[in-house]
Structures are given as structure tokens and as C-alpha cells.
Image (cartoon, rainbow, N blue to C red):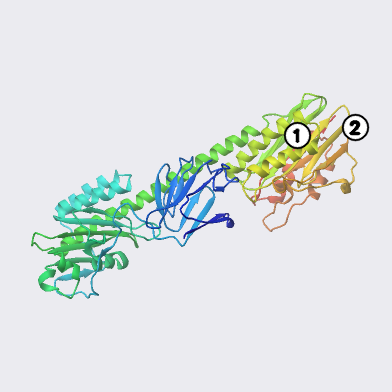
Amino acid sequence: MPTLVVRHRGEVVARLELGATPIRLGRAENCSVVLRNDSEVSREHAQFQLDDKGGVVVRDLGSKNGTRVDDGEAFRNEARPAGSRVRVGEHEIELIGANAPRRAGPSVTFAPESDTTAGGDTRFFPSSKRLDLNQHRLSLLMSLAERLGGTFERKQLLEEALDACCAALHFERGMIVAKTQRGDAELPVTRNVQTDENGAYKISRTLINRALLHGERAVVNNPATDLVGNLSESLVRFPIRSALCVPILNRDEILGVIYGDRVQRAASYTPEDVDFLAAIAQQVGLGLANLRLIQARLRAERMEAEFRQAREIQQALLPERPLCVRGVTLAGLNEPTSTVGGDYYDYFDLGDGRIGFVIADVTGHGLPAAILMSNMQAAVHVALGAEPDLPAVTSRINRLICENSVNSVFITAILGTIDPQRRVVEYVNAGHPHPVCLGISRDPADEDNSLPLGIEPEEEYRVQAIRLPREPSGLLFYTDGLIEAFDGRGAKLGLEPVTAALSGTPDWSPESVLRVTQTVLRDHLRDAANADDMTLLAVHVS
């Protein structure tokens, strides 16, 4: 009985035996395996079941992001046989003890035959042999290259190539077998090739294997009279009068095989014929390689579009301008190291005389981090406005993140409020670096840290208060991308150079504090690049 082992980032999250009852995966509670912490998983994503031969079949249930079987492309709203592993979002499902997958048609096997050595009227040529083509065949080849160059679908490319081979070389039967990226043979494209009672193609295994494994080209003539017991039983049994077989190459990589033969006509093939077929195979190899590049480009474009979308989401989260209200000014700065960073800050008027603010650093990057930050921003705005108790607000947000974030993703954050009338700043620190106080007397021992958000749903958070003097003062909140910046020699910046530079600054306006801090960081890095995102939030109280 097959066993499904569900892993997320290398950790086993579920292990189930697949029996008569199908196993359904998704985010919905009614699924057999609930994958709550994966934003790429749909509510009811995929279903695993056994076919009548004991093989595993995976059916995508109309998911948003599709399902992948083994190394194949993502598919939706259909069922496919699975061999060793399945990809659902960020989860990988390993299939242990599953029977080999059944294909939609005959498997790529060939009729059995005895061991062979070359001889008689069969000739093999190494792939390095120079091709000999006449002018007419060069014209045919150029025409085929033009047609293949405008083909962007793999099966269509192979069909066009096989049609050209059959027409130019008068094949009565033909086949193209292409390899997958794992090296397995795909279901072939064929012309007039029959299968036996076991589903094996009636084509010489020897010729196919010597081309597929060793890159050899072969021309066979009159095997029934010259090569009984010498080359291949299948060549005699079918019978085959003449045959050509060449590898499909792209540089030194064997991508597949082209095979063609005659079973009625007695005409022989020449070495020039095998050269021509090899030249066609070169064009097919180039076409397959180009399709790989196109598919890689499309994947890169999809990824780039995802990053653009994530960056747009992230930029929309950040305040457009400084906030000046009731003698308090706030401004921030975000410098991501990549297209999409994991830092976030915000500030807003709560409407009751207080000002809310937050600075946060989420582990990871990309669209999942941006979506998580978007959820957090909405939660902070709603919760801070409705609930004056900061620990209660933070606990609610923490539980929300624990329920909706993927495993091992957490957020360090400071959530707080500023009350200008009472001249007090209150905040909760969830595993985040402590702020720099400017013109404010504060004992570092008073600082208290709790666990970051998203780790422990029942974590308790405590409020901390900073009493503001009557004189102008300031605060600088920051992410660890500032103090953990390393220069080219591997020296870490730390906090001391920042506090020293700010202490000597007569103007603690947010604009001045941000500028001085940036200067300290750039002087430290010089030509080195910062390895982490850096975000600053400056507060000035007049």
C-alpha cells in the first residue's frame, strides 16, 4: 500500500497510507491533510487515489496555482499518474511504495531482442562524424529549420519534424522519442508503428539504445538476409527491410532519438541518408533547446511579474509622506536589498489624540512576505483603533499570524502609540531591536523583549513606556539591517557609531535623523552591499 509523506521545507508534516479512500489536500478543514500555512495552496487543492493497477493518480481540483507531478509542468483540473513525488504549493509529497505510473498510451518499450554486435549490412557512425549533404537536401533542411523555428509547442515541433523525415526519406514507419529533463523517455510521436500484446513498440531496442545512450547513428539494410542472429531479432521478425536511427543532440547532450524504416520497399539507405537524418535531428535538438529557453524565460517572466506585484503591494503599505500632528512628526525610510524586501513601517492618526506606529521585519522575501505584511498592516490599523490595550492588540495579531503564516516564518515588530498630551510613548516589543532615545533619559535595563510574532500563539506581551521630557526629543526605530551591516572586511556596524553620530546632531528632526543614519551606514559599507533590508522610523516631539 503506497504511503504519502508530506514535507514542508524539508520537515515532515504528515504521513498517510493511501488505500481505497482518496486523500484530499488543501487549506479547508474538511481535507484529509490540512495545509494551513501555505499561501499557494487552494482550499481544496489536489486529491490522491489508486487506479485499478495500484498506481497513484493525482487529480488537481481546480487549484489556483496548479499541481506538479514529478518534474512536469503545473496542471489544473485534470488527473495524472504520479511516480515518486508531487508538488502542491510549497509542500512536496513523496510517494513511497507506489507502483510505476500508468501512461495514457503504450509505454516506451521495445520488442525484446538478443545482444548484438555490428556487422553485415549495418553500419554505425559516431556522433562526431561530419555530415555530407547535397544542395537539394540543404534546401529542405533550411525550409524545415524555418518551420521549426516558428513552433513553440513541444509536441507540434516533434510532429512537424517526423512528417519532414517521412517525406524526405520515404519512411514507411517512423518514431521520435524525446527525453524528459530527468532522462526518462517520453511517450513517443509515431507514424504507422504498431505495438505487440504487451504494449511494446515493434521497433529495434538495439538501434534505439545505441542512439539514446551512446549517441551513435545507424543505417541498416537487408537485415533479414544478412544479419539473422547478428543484429536484432526484432529487425528480422517484423520484418524490416531497411532502417535509419540517429540521436537528437544539442551540443553534447542527447535529447532523444529519430527512427525510421521501410517494411515493404526493398530500397537501401546510404550513409548520406543517415547524414541527412542527423542534420534534421540537429535542427530538432536546436528547436527543443530553444523551447527549454523559452519555457525558462516564461518562468522568469512569471517570477518577475510576481516580484513586481509584491513590490507594488509593499510600496502601497508604506506611508506616502511624513505625518505631522499635535507637535509630533514621524517619517520613515525603507531600503530593500532585493526587488521585494521583508521590512515594513507605518504610522497613522488614531483619531483620539494618539498616534499609532509600527515597524516590523518579516523573515523571507517575495510575494508571501509581502502578503503577510499586507495582512499585518490591515490588522494593525483595525486593532489599534478599536483596542487601546497594546498587549491585547499584539496578542490578537500574533494569533492571526500564527494561523496564516507558513512554517518557520515570523515577524519581529514594535507596535506602539504616542500620546502628545500625556507626553508618553507606549509600545510592545516582539523580538525587535530597541529604539535609540534622543534627549530622553532611559535605562537600557528597562527594555523588555517578547518572542517575535508568529512563533507561539499564546505568547504574552508587556507594554513599555517612555516618558517624554518637556524639551524637544526624538526616537529612532530601526530593523537589524542597520546594526548588522557588514563592510568589505566583515566588520559589523553595530549601534554605537549610530548613537554617537546622532548625539552630536543638534537637529533631531526626522529628516535630519534619517540623513545622518544613512550617512553612517554608507561610510561603514563603502563599496560593499548591505546583505539585509534596512528600515528606519524617526519620531520627533517638539
Of 537 and 191, nearer the camera is 191
Q: Are marks 2 and 1 in contact (CB under 8 Å)?
A: no
Q: Position of residue 418 (x, y in %)?
A: 82, 32
The vertical placement of 313 against 526, above or below, is above
Of 429 and 56, nearer the camera is 56
SS at mark 1 in the image: strand
Q: Position of residue 500 (x, y in %)?
A: 83, 46
What is the crowding at mark 2: few (fewer than 14 residues within 10 Å), some, or many (at least 20)? few
Instruction: Give, as a three-letter code, the residue at label 1.
Output: Phe
Q: Residue at x 77, y 51 (%)?
A: 494
Q: Which residue is mark 1?
A: 357
Of 386 and 148, nearer the camera is 386
Instruction: Give, as a three-letter code, the residue at label 2.
Output: Glu
Q: Which residue is mark 2?
A: 471
Q: Residue at x 34, y 58 (%)?
A: 179
- The quadrant in which the C terminus is found is top right
Q: Does residue 455 show up?
A: yes
Q: Position of residue 367 (x, y in %)?
A: 57, 41
SS at mark 2 in the image: loop
Left/right of residue 112 with respect to residue 335 in the rendered view: left
Sequence order check, earlier mark of 2 and 1:
1
Quarter location, residue 437:
top right
Residue 214: image tag: none
Left/right of residue 518 with respect to residue 218 in the rendered view: right
Q: Position of residue 15 (x, y in %)?
A: 55, 57
> Residue farthest to the left?
266
> Residue farthest to the front?
20
Q: Give the label, 2 or 1, closer to the camera.
A: 1
The vertical placement of 137 against 242, above or below, is above
